[in-house]
Amino acid sequence: MLSQFTKVCRCGIATSAMKQINKVTVIGGGQMGAGIAQVAAAAGDQVTLVDVNDSVLQNSEKTILKSLERVVKKKYAESPEAGSAYIEDIMDRISTNTDVMAASKDVDLVIEAIVENLGVKQELFKKLDGIASSNTIFASNTSSLPIREIAKATNRLDRFGGVHFFNPVPLMKLVEIVKAPETSQATFDTLTKWGKKLGKTTVSCQDTPGFLVNRLLVPYLMEAVRLYERGHGSKEDIDVAMKLGASYPMGPFELADYVGLDTCKFIIDGWSELEPDNPLFKPSPLLNELVAEGKLGRKSGEGFYTYKK
Ligand SMILES: CCCCCCC[C@H](O)CC(=O)SCCNC(=O)CCNC(=O)[C@H](O)C(C)(C)COP(=O)([O-])OP(=O)([O-])OC[C@H]1O[C@@H](n2cnc3c(N)ncnc32)[C@H](O)[C@@H]1OP(=O)([O-])[O-]
Ligand SMILES: NC(=O)c1ccc[n+]([C@@H]2O[C@H](COP(=O)([O-])OP(=O)(O)OC[C@H]3O[C@@H](n4cnc5c(N)ncnc54)[C@H](O)[C@@H]3O)[C@@H](O)[C@H]2O)c1
């Protein structure tokens, strides 16, 4: 368990030093939460994955297992037995729980990857703040919401930061570490060290809309949708164009489906509310329509494209 490591400097002011994270609760077992649980357990952390019910958590476990099997196919191609032991070892470090309060009582870090909605995230952390140890750091994997706004629901603004992973978490090498105005240097350093322990490259971000990657990626994806809405290109051609003309691994429509169209909509609606006159943040009628029809991308079997279940 993380120890509150408090130093008193010569001036007499107590300052908290960087801590070691070994025990983590991940809230939200969807595509991001499952990935975060996987990479944390692979790095040796004891992980509890939380979601609203057991059937979601069973799916999360299946997703993690499938992903680990893909990793092992490459990493242990010559030694299937060592591969099985590797998977077993990681799965042994992951437990699941539907009781978020019990799962968050005594851990070094609570990181959430639930729905991209400020009120829901605030409500979650407000509840947790009352029961989690004062040593526990809170973090959000939000794509687009201000970390400070989420943290304001708690009395631990100094022990609250952003840790933004990318999808698919096991493969994407970057993690953005977000320092909100009140995030302490010790918290920021602890989160950065944790990101590196998970094998990721970290970049340091301020608490500005979209941090670094999404401030560029969101306008690009939305502009692709607008291009298509204007009838200036088919989605297939736009995807091919960006893959072969710009060497992106996925075209914008493939990527939006991969991310989840509900998440895309939550992001753009939030930014458009924040800056209604910014043409880059204009919502898209087509995106709204698809989400209203339950076409959320790969996770629901249909979005801009149709996927085999
Ligand atoms: C409108 C607003 C929207 C904003 C959205 C923002 C969202 C968010 O905040 C930020 C993001 O995340 S942005 C999103 C950022 N993300 C991006 O931009 C992603 C862009 N896409 C890509 O980088 C690639 O298409 C992928 C890596 C996803 C798949 O690669 P591919 O070549 O097209 O297809 P492949 O052949 O299937 O797989 C290749 C190899 O990878 C292996 N593997 C795959 N999945 C795995 C898993 N889960 N586990 C383990 N392994 C996995 C697979 O086994 C294979 O191994 P092999 O040994 O070589 O056979
Ligand atoms: N999808 C991406 O590419 C991506 C990338 C980076 C960051 N994010 C961010 O990560 C977060 C999750 O995104 P996702 O794509 O994994 O979503 P998802 O829809 O796949 O999963 C969300 C999960 O959270 C659960 N959940 C919702 N409310 C909950 C609560 N109160 N308590 C416990 N569990 C709850 C849901 O049951 C669901 O399983 C969002 O904030 C999103 O912006 C997403």
Image (cartoon, rainbow, N blue to C red):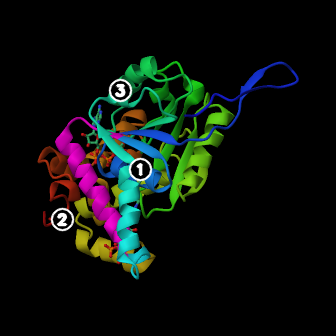
Disc 2 crowd rating (10 Å Cα; few below 14, some 14-19, many 20+) is: some
Magenta region, residue range: 49-73
User: Residue 87 falls in which quadrant of the image?
Assistant: bottom left
Tell me which residue sits at (45%, 44%) in the image.
Answer: 46
Comparing marks 3 and 2, which lies closer to the viewer? 3
Q: Is residue 61 above or below residue 227?
A: above
User: Residue 36's mark?
Assistant: 1
Q: Residue 11 at what x, y percent from top left?
A: 87, 21
* Residue nearest the viewer, comparing 45 with 168: 45
Task: Tell me: 305 left or right of 44.
Answer: left
Q: Is residue 3 above or below residue 269?
A: above
* Magenta-drawn stretch, dominant element (helix, strand or loop): helix
* Residue 252 at least partly seen: no
Ligand 1 shows up in the quarter that is bottom left
* Residue nearest the viewer, comparing 42 with 234: 42
Tell me which residue sits at (52%, 46%) in the image.
Answer: 211
Tell me which residue sits at (41%, 71%) in the image.
Answer: 82
* Residue 26 at least partly seen: yes
Task: Check if residue 269 falls in the magenta segment.
Answer: no
Q: Quadrant of the C terminus?
A: bottom left
Q: Which residue is mark 3?
A: 102
Mark 3 and mark 1: Cα distance apart in space? 20 Å
Tell me which residue sits at (57%, 53%) in the image.
Answer: 197
Q: Residue 252 at what x, y percent from top left?
A: 33, 64
Q: Residue 157 at what x, y percent from top left?
A: 56, 25
